[in-house]
Image (cartoon, helix red, strand yellow):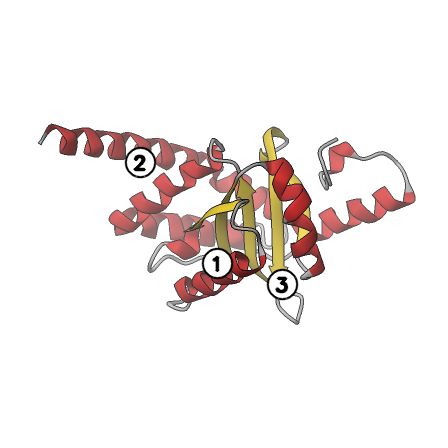
Amino acid sequence: MGPGCACYNCYGDTELDKSLEQRIEEAVREEVAIVPYDPEWPRMFEIEAEFLRGVLPGSVVLRIEHFGSTAIWGTASKPIIDLLVEVSSLEEALERVVPVLEVAGYDYFWRPESGDDGDFYHWFIRRNKDGVRTHHIHMVEADSKLWDGLYFRDYMREFPEEAERYGKLKMELSEKYPKDRVAYHEGKSEYVVRVTEKAREYYKHYKLSRERK
């Protein structure tokens, strides 16, 4: 079992664990709502990033990036700001970050990077006063596969027609799975993996081309 683990498979059959199971079930069954792009999203990221830098130790929190669909101009998305945060180590973050954000009211989960497989990382949900999700905080080390999401983000920013296709796919999936976040994410995972690999190759070639000049 991971530190502070909130993944279902890591728990046994106790009353406390049933409560945790219910918490996870409620989280994955929250409504999937796709809305038009909001130009306020970048500012919401900056405000949250500034808050995190202000309350968390700088020796642990090393880098904060805006990623996910709200980081792609003009793209329809769930109105939830995704932040990718590099930490010096997951162990240090467990000791010096998790308690601070839990006291601040964030929901905390120790979750796998992909499905039930892969490395685990610290994940937080921030909600507004009405209990609606506003931010997801993904805390990982420098070698996490989640950093590949920046390839996807940058590629979508550079090629708006691809971003438009992605927005349409998300809209279709949200209508098909309005109360099932797991099915929604699984429905777009193949597309995201394919475009991320395409983006990785594109930027690798771009970097090599610039180095040769």
Q: Disc 2 to disc 1, how far (Cα)?
A: 26 Å
Locate the C terminus and report the quarter of the image it occupies. top left
The local secondary structure at tag 2 comes to: helix
Residues 75 and 119: in front is: 119
Q: Residue 115: horizontal and vertical position, in percent?
A: 60, 34
Q: Disc 3 to disc 1, how far (Cα)?
A: 15 Å
Q: Which residue is mark 2?
A: 199
**Relative horizontal placement of residue 31, taking residue 70 as reference (left or right):** right
Q: Residue 155: horizontal and vertical position, in percent?
A: 30, 43
Residue appearing at x 62%, y 43% in the figure: 93
The vertical placement of 168 against 39, above or below, is above
Q: Earlier in the sequence, mark 3 or mark 1?
A: 1
The vertical placement of 138 against 31, above or below, is above
Q: Residues within 10 Å of mark 1 (few under 14, many from 20)?
A: some
| Res 127 seen here | yes
Residue appearing at x 78%, y 44% in the figure: 21
User: Identity of the amino acid at label 3?
Assistant: Arg
Which numbered dot is residue 49? 1
The vertical placement of 185 against 103, above or below, is above
- Confirm or deny contact between disc 3 and disc 1 (CB under 8 A): no
Q: Residue 203: horizontal and vertical position, in percent?
A: 26, 35
Q: Residue 73: horizontal and vertical position, in percent?
A: 33, 58
Residue appearing at x 56%, y 53% in the figure: 136
Residue appearing at x 39%, y 55% in the figure: 71
Q: Nearer the viewer, mark 3 or mark 2?
A: 3
Q: Which residue is mark 3?
A: 127
Q: Quadrant of residue 194?
A: top left
